[in-house]
């Protein structure tokens, strides 16, 4: 039986939609370990080899452009990208807000955060390491891409089957 009914396009669309929904759930679950971390002040070096380094502040300053850098033992500074979500973590009576996330950490990293305007900064900064964030995010990407690829391939197969049927019908009636 070849899928020649146009409703098979709907099945392909629903499969793609379902895979994107599952990928979204998996991606949202990647943030769970970030919500459960214990923060460490930036005065302590971070041993983040093979983990994701996340940076927090106790005072959100959206009007100030705060940039964070991590310097490893090689003294080469690495910019820490801004976090995609605003996640709040309660730790020892303090409320910390996620501001940065570095996928590939290294041992002996010193984290420094400074506002670009160079004015006095009353905020405190801290870091934590998260295991498994990158792999969960990659799993979500893989699920989404694979699901969409299968759905597009199936829709293409439906198109090809419908075209073949039309050509056979045209040959028979000629």
Image (tube, rainbow, N blue to C red):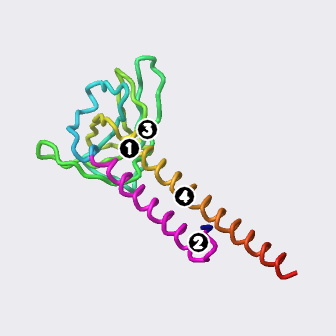
- Of label 1 and label 2, which has the lower sequence position? 2
Q: Residues within 10 Å of mark 1 (few under 14, many from 20)?
A: some
Q: Which residue is mark 4?
A: 148
* SS state under label 1: helix
- The C terminus, quarter of image: bottom right
Camera-side residue: 83 or 61?
83
Residue 149 percent location from the top left of the image: 58, 55
Q: Is residue 151 magenta?
A: no
Instruction: Tell me: 47 left or right of 69.
Output: left
Residue 50 percent location from the top left of the image: 37, 27
Q: CA distance from mark 1 to mark 4?
A: 18 Å
Q: Are marks 1 and 2 in contact (CB under 8 Å)?
A: no
In the current view of this chain or complex, which residue is farthest to the left? 93
Tell me the number on the disc at residue 136: 1
- Of label 1 and label 4, which has the lower sequence position? 1
Q: Are marks 1 and 4 in contact (CB under 8 Å)?
A: no
> Residue at image x 28%, y 44%?
34
Instruction: Tell me: 38 left or right of 25.
Output: left
- Of label 3 and label 1, which has the lower sequence position? 3
Camera-side residue: 61 or 140?
140
From this view, report whether residue 126 is shown above or below residue 117: above
Q: Which residue is mark 3?
A: 80
In the current view of this chain or complex, which residue is farthest to the right? 174
Q: Which residues are magenta?
A: 3-32
Q: Residues within 10 Å of mark 3 (few under 14, many from 20)?
A: many
Residue 58 percent location from the top left of the image: 24, 47
Camera-side residue: 32 or 20?
20
Tag nearer the camera, 2 or 3: 2
- Of label 2 and label 3, which has the lower sequence position? 2
The quarter holding residue 22 reads bottom left
Instruction: Tell me: 172 left or right of 23.
Output: right
């Amino acid at each position: 039986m070849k899928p020649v009914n146009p409703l098979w396009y709907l099945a392909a669309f629903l499969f793609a939609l379902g895979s994107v929904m599952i990928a979204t759930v998996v991606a949202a679950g990647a943030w769970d370990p970030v919500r459960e971390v214990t923060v460490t002040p930036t005065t302590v070096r971070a041993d983040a080899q093979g983990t994701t380094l996340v940076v927090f502040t106790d005072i959100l300053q959206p009007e100030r452009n705060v940039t964070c850098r991590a310097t490893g033992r090689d003294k080469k500074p690495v910019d820490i990208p801004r976090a995609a979500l605003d996640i709040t973590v309660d730790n020892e009576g303090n409320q910390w807000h996620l501001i940065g996330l570095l996928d590939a950490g290294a041992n002996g990293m010193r984290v420094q955060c400074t506002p670009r305007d160079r004015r006095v900064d009353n905020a405190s900064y801290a870091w934590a390491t998260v295991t498994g964030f990158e792999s969960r995010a990659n799993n979500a990407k893989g699920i989404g891409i694979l699901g969409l690829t299968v759905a597009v391939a199936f829709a293409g197969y439906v198109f090809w089957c419908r075209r073949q049927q039309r050509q056979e019908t045209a040959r028979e009636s000629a």
